[in-house]
Image (cartoon, helix red, strand yellow):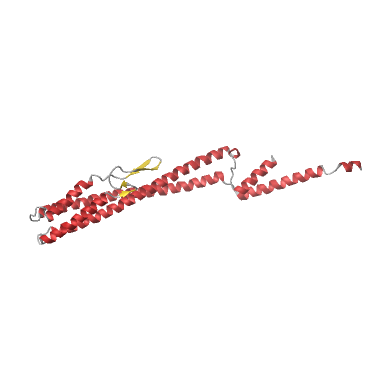
């Protein structure tokens, strides 16, 4: 028994671990497995949060770019709606509006990891035991947005060669204002999700720190205490060996003399 205790203390001193084999502490070993499982699950949630955060940051970037495009179209519409703007200037504005339309379409078709960022079926991420998070499908935006651009270009430079239609331009201008509000609302919603991810990520990191602390309490030893016990056991073992050696010291030759 003394040799077993000595061997176990030596193992603990060299490894720094309280549990070398499950039979050393079955309850502690079970607790260790449970904690490591929780840490693995938490780590997966953290990876999911990182993916979701990347997606939503890309979404914010796309929506910010779209805001700039719509704002530029509105600026041009304000210049083109006045009766003092000559027809050739309105035609030039219409040409730029067509380029803005193409850019807006490109933004709406942005892809990340071979998936549409703003349209179609949105990915879902499990970021906590009972928390799923996703983003909004904006696929119904493009039809009306494209119609607004077309109305604006037709108002500025009608394809049939007629005079510019200031009423159509004015109406398109109002619709552009509505689009700016809608995009701002979508960005606010996306920002709220990003903020929630930050909160969940901070909570997960705090839980991971707590799990590490609990795991350390279960698996790791107090080296000072172990070394003191080891030295004590070694001294007791050496004393026992010395006592045994003194008991068997007389030899057969001593008896013959």
- Between 176 and 145, the one nearer to me in the picture: 145
Q: Position of residue 197 (x, y in %)?
A: 37, 48
Question: On the picture, is 254 further left or further right than 138?
Answer: right
Left or right: 157, with 21 as reference point: left
* Residue furthest right as drawn: 257
Which quadrant of the figure has residue 79? Answer: bottom left
Q: Quadrant of residue 11?
A: top right
Name the residue: 17% across, 50% down.
Answer: 148
Q: Is residue 234 left or right of residue 248?
A: left
Whether residue 14 appears in this view of the structure is yes
The image position of residue 18, as x and y in percent, is: 59, 44
Picture residue at 64% right of the left edge, 43% below the top: 8
Residue at the image position 45 percent from the left and 48 percent from the top: 206
Q: In the displayed structure, does residue 163 sit left or right of residue 17?
A: left
Q: Where's residue 233, x and y in %?
A: 69, 46
Give the quarter of the figure containing the C terminus: top right
Q: How many marks?
A: 0
Q: Position of residue 199 (x, y in %)?
A: 38, 48
Visible residue check, residue 184: no
Q: Residue at x 76, y 44 (%)?
A: 241
Q: Quadrant of the N terminus?
A: top right
Q: From what the image shows, is residue 223 above or below residue 92?
A: above
Of residue 171 and residue 97, the one placed in the foreground of this image is 97
Near-viewer residue (242 or 149): 149
């Amino acid at each position: 028994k003394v040799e077993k205790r000595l061997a176990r203390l030596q193992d603990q001193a060299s490894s720094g671990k309280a549990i070398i084999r499950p039979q050393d502490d079955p309850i502690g070993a079970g607790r260790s497995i449970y904690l490591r499982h929780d840490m693995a699950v938490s780590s997966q949630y953290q990876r999911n949060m990182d993916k979701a955060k990347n997606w939503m940051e890309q979404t914010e970037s796309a929506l910010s770019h779209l805001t700039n495009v719509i704002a530029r179209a509105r600026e041009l519409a304000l210049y083109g709606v006045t009766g003092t703007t000559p027809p050739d200037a309105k035609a030039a504005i219409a040409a730029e509006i067509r380029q803005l339309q193409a850019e807006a379409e490109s933004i709406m078709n942005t892809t990340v990891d071979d998936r549409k960022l703003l349209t179609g079926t949105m990915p879902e991420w499990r970021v906590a035991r009972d928390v799923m998070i996703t983003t909004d499908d904006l696929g119904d935006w493009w039809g009306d947005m494209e119609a607004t651009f077309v109305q604006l270009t037709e108002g500025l430079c009608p394809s049939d060669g007629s005079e510019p239609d200031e009423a159509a331009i004015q109406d398109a201008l109002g619709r552009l204002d509505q689009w700016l509000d809608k995009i701002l609302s979508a960005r606010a919603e996306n920002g709220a999700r990003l903020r929630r991810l930050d909160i969940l990520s901070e909570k997960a990191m705090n839980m991971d720190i707590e799990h590490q602390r609990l795991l350390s309490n279960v698996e790791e030893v107090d080296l000072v205490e172990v070394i003191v016990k080891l030295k004590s056991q070694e001294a007791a073992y050496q004393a026992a060996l010395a006592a045994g050696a003194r008991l068997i010291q007389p030899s057969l030759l001593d008896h013959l003399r």
